[in-house]
Image (spheres, rainbow, N blue to C red):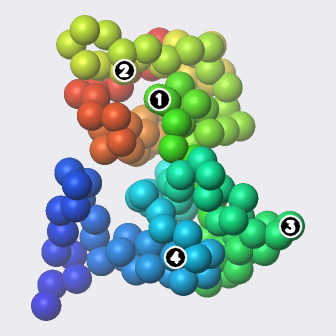
């Protein structure tokens, strides 16, 4: 049995670790999550807007517990449009706007400091963010200007 085997679910590729994280999340919070991904060494879980407070728990208890279980930072974000979604993922980095052109490419307009933070060393962060946005919003690519 190969642990690196990819399982396709609704167009998103999930590895065994992601599936385990989804199961742990639903057991701890009692909320079904749409997806999970890692960005900048932080695990994100996407839930419906109405389930957000239940997923976080009283005083963030569920998030703290998940962080200890998964041994990394955990954030829960609601499903939303591409602008709000991207802002929540890259927080605390702030950018001016994001748009999708006719060819299907997303472009983030940011200042010089934010641009450097969004791209990251050896383009690590922009590649992660590009994969995340491709998975959730079906874009072809990502540019930072």
**Disc 4 to disc 2, C-alpha distance:** 31 Å
Q: Assess disc 4: are there few (<14), some (14-19) or many (≥20) residues with their C-alpha within 10 Å of its C-alpha.
A: few
Q: Assess disc 1: are there few (<14), some (14-19) or many (≥20) residues with their C-alpha within 10 Å of its C-alpha.
A: some
* Residue appearing at x 31%, y 10% in the figure: 101
Q: Which quadrant holds residue 60?
A: bottom right
**Disc 3 to disc 1, C-alpha distance:** 28 Å
Work out whether mark 4 precedes mark 3 in sequence or the reverse, and give the earlier one: 4
Q: Which quadrant holds residue 90?
A: top right
Work out whether mark 1 precedes mark 4 in sequence or the reverse, and give the earlier one: 4
Viewport quadrant of the N terminus: bottom left
**Disc 1 to disc 4, C-alpha distance:** 25 Å
Q: Are marks 2 and 3 in contact (CB under 8 Å)?
A: no
Q: Secondary structure at mark 3?
A: helix
Work out whether mark 3 precedes mark 1 in sequence or the reverse, and give the earlier one: 3
133 to the left or right of 115:
left
Residue 122 in sight from this viewpoint: no
Kindly identify which residue carries mark 1.
Answer: 82
Kindly identify which residue carries mark 3.
Answer: 59
Q: Assess disc 2: are there few (<14), some (14-19) or many (≥20) residues with their C-alpha within 10 Å of its C-alpha.
A: many
Kindly identify which residue carries mark 2.
Answer: 106
Q: Which mark is residue 26?
A: 4
How far across and down, in percent of the image, does residue 17 sit?
Answer: 37, 76
How far across and down, in percent of the image, does residue 14 sit?
Answer: 28, 65
């Amino acid at each position: 049995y190969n642990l690196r085997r990819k399982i396709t679910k609704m167009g998103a590729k999930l590895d065994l670790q992601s599936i385990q994280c989804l199961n742990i999340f639903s057991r701890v919070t009692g909320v079904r999550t749409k997806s999970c991904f890692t960005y900048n060494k932080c695990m994100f879980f996407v839930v419906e807007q109405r389930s957000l407070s239940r997923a976080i728990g009283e005083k963030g208890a569920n998030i703290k517990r998940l962080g200890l279980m998964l041994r990394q930072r955990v954030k829960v974000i609601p499903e939303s449009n591409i602008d709000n979604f991207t802002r929540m993922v890259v927080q605390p980095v702030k950018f001016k706007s994001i748009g999708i052109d006719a060819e299907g490419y997303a472009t983030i307009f940011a200042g010089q400091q934010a641009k450097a933070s969004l791209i990251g060393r050896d383009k690590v962060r922009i590649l992660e963010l590009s994969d995340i946005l491709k998975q959730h919003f079906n874009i072809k690519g990502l540019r930072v200007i």
